[in-house]
Amino acid sequence: MSSTPPASRRDLVRGLAAGGLAAGSLAAARPAAAQPAATQPQGAAPAGQPAPTGAPVLANPQDRFPKPPFPAQSQPWPALQSKMDPVPDCGEASYRGSGRLAGRRALITGGDSGIGRAAAIAYAREGADVAINYLEAEQPDAEDVARHIREAGRKAVLIPGDLRDEAFCTRLVEQAREQLGGLDILVSNAAYQHAQQKLADISTEQLDQTMKTNVYAMFWLTKAALPHLPPGAAIIVTSSVNADRPSPMILDYACTKAANEAFVKALAKQVIGQGIRVNGVAPGPFWTPLQVGGGQTEEGLKNFGTTVPMGRPGQPVELASTYVELAAATSSYITGQIYGQTGGVGWP
Ligand code: NAD
Ligand code: MG
């Protein structure tokens, strides 16, 4: 796989970037009939069709990626995305950058897989050096992300470790800063989700794991990073549709996602005086390891995405340009916002 677009497309991307349009807008910027013959829809192709190779074309978004029913599957937590069926699409074969984050330095938690991986690949292809954090058990997924970052010509820093430990969170930020030569973008994205039928089934141990991973780590990482972030820096927190429309099966998780959003809105007001923007992303159902490692029931996983108007789950690559947008200097007036990407249920 090459991360360099063909010359004609590269020129087109440059032209669009100069005109304020991102590569993701290509499909809208020219009619389908004008597509070069070699281009195919972005991301995973429907079963039976050849693997995608090029730029996005004008296509019905409902048909663009795999739909339920999905094959029965489960993995012990934390699940590996390389073992999922289908493997999530994080933009490996499709995301094209246009220098929107040239020279930036980013730390992304949960950057080994799913949504964080899509952000990591996109950031590197937009010109940023990227440090990712993950759990040791996820080393194979993390090394694959590092390969993509390096193939984009950027520095990849791998820092495994458990975010439930405050001392580790502080060290993580320090190590990322040291190895990247500074820090301009913090993406607090890692999370734990475990479905339970009833409140009584949520053990104190589970509650603790969900709260520490999803809320405490966000506080600890941000506290450690803030004194070092320059004006123009961006903090992005991954929330969820569950912050506002909580599913009864993931009550503890939904509480943490509401906390993520309150944190974003309050912190944004606190730190704009330092020139730092803080925003959140609230995804709906996305096809990631979080769901197969205990995040969903077996039935919920099989029909994952059927409850939203889109009729399918999102693929992480469909969030990549949102993470780029929120980090980029072109978004200088955007702070304290939560970007919903929920498959059509409306937000908030
Ligand atoms: P994912 O499994 O790919 O990413 C979650 C990551 O969290 C893991 O890769 C793991 O590295 C990390 N993690 C978990 N516990 C950790 C710990 N104790 N220490 C260090 N790292 C730890 O799944 P994803 O869906 O891409 O999740 C990313 C974010 O998206 C999460 O904040 C999740 O709440 C949010 N989200 C996901 C969905 C969805 O449907 N997949 C929907 C809404 C929000
Ligand atoms: Mg993972």
Image: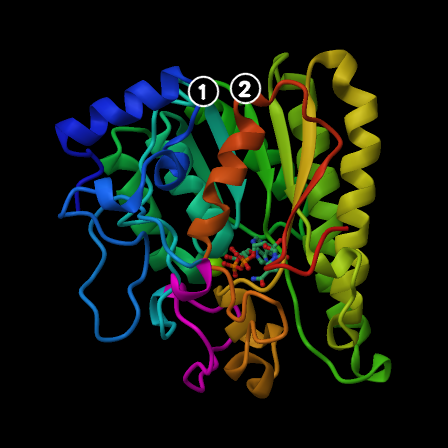
Q: Give the image location of residue 317, x and y in percent.
A: 42, 50
Residue at the (73%, 81%) spot, across then down: 196
Visible residue check, residue 55:
yes
Q: Nearer the viewer, mark 2 or mark 1?
A: 1
Q: 342 and 80: which one is in front?
A: 342
Rate crowding at label 2 as few (under 14), some (14 to 19) or many (20 or more) other CA atoms within 10 Å: few
- Identify the residue shown where x is 81% and y is 72%: 204
Label 2 SS:
helix
Q: How far across and how far down the image is residue 154, in percent?
A: 31, 29
Disc 1 packing (10 Å; few <14; some 14–19; many ≥20): few
| Membership of 67 in magenta stretch | yes
Residue 126, above or below 330: below
Q: 346 or 29: which is nearer to us? A: 29
Label 2 with label 1: CB-CB less than 8 Å: yes
Please determine whether, in this image, residue 201 is positioned above or below residue 48.
below
The x and y percentages for residue 119 are: 46, 42
Q: Which quadrant of the structure image shows residue 275? A: top right
> Residue 20 bears which disc, if any?
1
Residue annotated with mark 2: 330
The answer to whether residue 158 shows anywhere in this view is no
Dot 2 amino acid type? Thr
- Residue 220 position by quadrant: top right
Residue shown at 77% from the left, 56% from the top? 243
Tell me: is circle 2 under 8 Å from ligand 1. no
**Magenta segment, which residues?**
61-81
The amino acid pointed to by label 1 is Gly
Up-down relation of residue 67 to residue 267 (above or below): below
Please tell me the numbered disc located at residue 173. Answer: none
Mark 2–mark 1 Cα distance, whole angstroms, equals: 9 Å
Estimate the x, y position of residue 314 in percent, counting from the top left: 50, 60
Dot 1 lies on which element?
loop
